[in-house]
């Protein structure tokens, strides 16, 4: 039981490049979330998926797209990376009827 | 609206107590508390639900004043392992699990 896993752990991009951050959970959770965390700030919700087949915007969705591939996997795509997207990205999941969110280890992204 | 946490930082000696506050301008369904150590993911500590239910850590307690939209986290007899950044996350409803997090309170416990 690995919990929530994220790949890659670290990535360096040049401005304008695209990439996809992967997230998977093996806890049979229904809801999944993508957050970003900038220095000195709390976590900000980018997108979430309340259940398989649905996605919705969070606080800071601009510049990102998501795909809920199946119940286990929720990916975050940067189509044209910008330096302002340099951040640590966390994926989280939550079981139906439960309140607790479980976080993955994070992906550190540097956009030059 | 992001909840406001206070203080921003606190330094303690082992065995001392601390209180971290979280205040929101919106009506709340629940308040979640997480601790994050440097370079690691946030770890769940405590959840307080509207109506008074609490679930969480054995050695950490918290309160939730629904009318004032405020929550406080109480760390008693602090240990070195309590060091880290504490975040409160607030939810207006339980349907989606959407949390809005405060900016964090950094706690350092010294021997």
Image (cartoon, coloured by chain):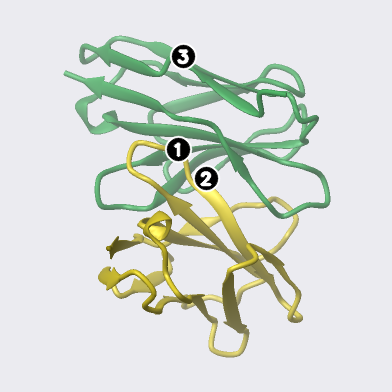
Chain colours: A green, B yellow
- C-beta proximity under 8 Å, tags 1 and 2: yes
Question: In x, y percent, where is residue A58?
Answer: 52, 45
Mark 3 or mark 2, earlier in chain: 3
Q: Nearer the viewer, mark 1 or mark 3?
A: 3
> Which residue is labeled 2 in the image?
A58
Which of disc 3 and disc 1 is earlier in sequence? Answer: 3
Residue at mark 1? A61
The answer for which chain carries disc 3 is: A
Other residues around mark 2 within 10 Å, as few (<14) / some (14–19) / many (≥20): some
Depicted A85 relative to depicted A73: above or below: below
What is the quadrant of residue A30 in the picture?
top right
Q: Is residue A87 left or right of residue A32?
A: left
Disc 1 element: loop
Quadrant of the image occupied by residue B9: bottom left
Q: CA distance from mark 1 to mark 2?
A: 6 Å
The chain containing the residue under callout 2 comes to: A
- Whether label 1 touches label 3, CB < 8 Å: no
Q: Position of residue B79 (x, y in %)?
A: 41, 63
Q: Residue at x 41, y 37 (%)?
A: B40
Residue B25: x percent and y percent? 47, 78
Q: Are marks 1 and 3 on the same chain?
A: yes
Q: How many residues crowd around disc 1 within 10 Å: few (fewer than 14), some, or many (20 or more)? A: some
Q: Mark 1 — on which chain does it sit?
A: A
Q: Which residue is mark 3?
A: A20
């Amino acid at each position: 039981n690995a919990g929530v896993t994220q790949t890659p752990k670290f990535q360096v991009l040049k401005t304008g490049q695209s990439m996809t951050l992967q997230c998977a959970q093996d806890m049979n959770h229904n809801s999944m979330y993508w957050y970003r965390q900038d220095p000195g700030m709390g976590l900000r919700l980018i997108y979430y998926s309340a259940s398989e087949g649905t996605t919705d915007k969070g606080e800071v969705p601009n510049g990102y797209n998501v795909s809920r591939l199946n119940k286990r996997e929720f990916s975050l795509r940067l189509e044209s990376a910008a330096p302002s997207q340099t951040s640590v990205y966390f994926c989280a999941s939550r079981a139906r009827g439960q309140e607790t969110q479980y976080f993955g280890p994070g992906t550190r992204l540097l956009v030059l | 609206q992001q909840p406001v946490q206070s203080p921003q930082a606190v330094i303690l000696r082992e065995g001392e107590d601390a209180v971290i506050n979280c205040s929101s301008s919106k009506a709340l369904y629940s308040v979640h508390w997480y601790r994050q150590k440097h370079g690691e993911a946030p770890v769940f500590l405590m959840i307080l639900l509207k109506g008074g239910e609490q679930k969480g850590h054995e050695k950490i307690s918290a309160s939730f004043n629904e009318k004032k939209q405020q929550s406080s986290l109480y760390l008693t007899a602090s240990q070195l392992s309590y060091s880290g950044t504490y975040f409160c996350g607030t939810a207006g409803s339980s349907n989606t699990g959407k949390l809005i997090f405060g900016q964090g309170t950094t706690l350092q416990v010294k021997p």
